[in-house]
Image (cartoon, rainbow, N blue to C red):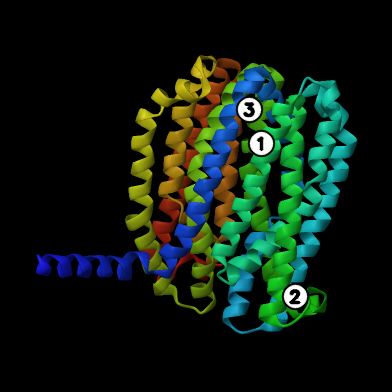
Amino acid sequence: MRKLWFSLRAICANFYAKVIGRKFVRNVGVLTIANFVGAGLSFAQGILIARWLGPELYGVTALVMTYPGLVFTFFDARSSEASVKYLSEFHAQGDRDRVLAMCKLGYLIDLGIACIAFLTILFTATWASEAIAHRPEAVGLIVIYAAAFIPRGLVGTSRAVLVTLGKFPLIAWIETFTTFLRVMLVLGLASAGWQVAGVVWGNTIAMAVMGLVKGAIGWLMIYRHWGAFLTQGKLQHLKQQSQEIFKFLFYNNITALIGTIPKQIDTLLLGYFRSPLEVGYYQLAKKLSSIVSYFVGPLQSVTYPELSRLSGLGKISAIQNKVKKLAFQIGIPLGLTVLAFTLILPRGLTIFFGNEYQPATQAIQLLFLGAAIWLTFFWLKPVFMATGEMKFWASNSALVVILTLAGFAMAIPLGGYVGLAWVWLITGGLGGHLFATIYLLYKWKNATAVPGELK
């Protein structure tokens, strides 16, 4: 018995040392736990809001908040990805001046774009409320929601600072707090009879608070770890890297823009050509399948700065080995798990959301299948971004978007929200990841370096 006890202790100790004790696993774990706490809260919120509003008002709410998000997408420079890449490299090299300059550049870009996006929404809100939301009285809600994008402009660079410094537990606490605040506000206001307005106001306040909190903590971390205020950063320290940085920003912006547009415009097109009822079904399907992002987000957040650090130090073979482990030890097992979950999903739909959402079942399953593929290949985007191969990533995204939009043109008239789900599975799920994987394997097979050396 004593030998068995010592044997079990040895097994547990070995498991902790090789799995739980690894920094990568701990960082991914803390973000994943925080995401699932947030997912649980959001899931509870989704059930209650969907029941209280019904499919039609649920669809109206989605349209009111989707339009400002789409406009912001057009202007957003996605500087946070560039900030993570170059902050990780500069920090690894001990270059304090360029770290401060990169932080300053990120904040200036994000806040400037947020202001431009808000002004654009302000002047187009009347049209959007009539043509897209089909509720002229919703114009004020569109403007109110858009205003929260200004303080949200502090989030991107602040998160990049925390990621670079490895402050993943702190990120987890902040995001859990803001999610809890959002859920309490939305449920409180909606239950008080505010309906659509309550959901919009709750999300607006929570978004603004998240921006201010992350901004304050980000600035504090900059001072504590690099010994200077953000205002002391001088952009001229980036002069030598300016062309490389703006080239990265350009390709990353193009990639994110063309990739995000279909994710926003699908709901708007469905609302424009069909009805808020179908938008309600489709929105529920998107909300549920987005649960997979609670896995993908932490995995990419931890993987990206590590690959960027290895790239900055020139450790090419280490990047290749890292990617292989990520694919076979994490991506494939998790993807298969989601695939299995998809098969049993319909049984719980009516239990949680009621019989009136039963028509959304097929769309939910299709979107979950696409999400399983995304999870399996979560490592693709970090490796292409970290190694600087943004030109192909942008080209691949553009091809996928063209095919997706062409699919929308056929899917909306013929199949409505179910047709849109099929398009996402075929183009965004299978097509995009397949093209990128083939390219990566081809480069690794026919060159002595990873794609990052093939600028």
* Viewer can see residue 249: no
Secondary-structure class at tag 3: helix
Drawn side of residue 342 relative to residue 408, left or right: left
Q: Which mark is residue 49?
A: 3
Query: Whole-Å distance between the Cαs marked 1 and 2?
Result: 33 Å
Q: Residue at x 59, y 66 (%)?
A: 163
Q: Name the residue carrying label 2.
A: 101
Q: Residue at x 39, y 57 (%)?
A: 441
Query: Whole-Å distance between the Cαs marked 3 and 2?
Result: 44 Å
Q: Position of residue 92 (x, y in %)?
A: 57, 80
Task: Answer with mark 3 or mark 2, whichever residue precedes in sequence.
Answer: 3
Q: Amino acid at mark 3?
A: Ile
For the view shown, which residue lies furthest in the front direction? 1
Q: Amino acid at mark 2?
A: Ala
Q: Position of residue 370 (x, y in %)?
A: 46, 37
Drawn side of residue 340 relative to residue 279, left or right: left
Dot 1 surroundings within 10 Å: few (below 14), some, or many (20 or more)?
some
Q: Name the residue carrying label 1.
A: 264
Q: Residue at x 56, y 40 (%)?
A: 41
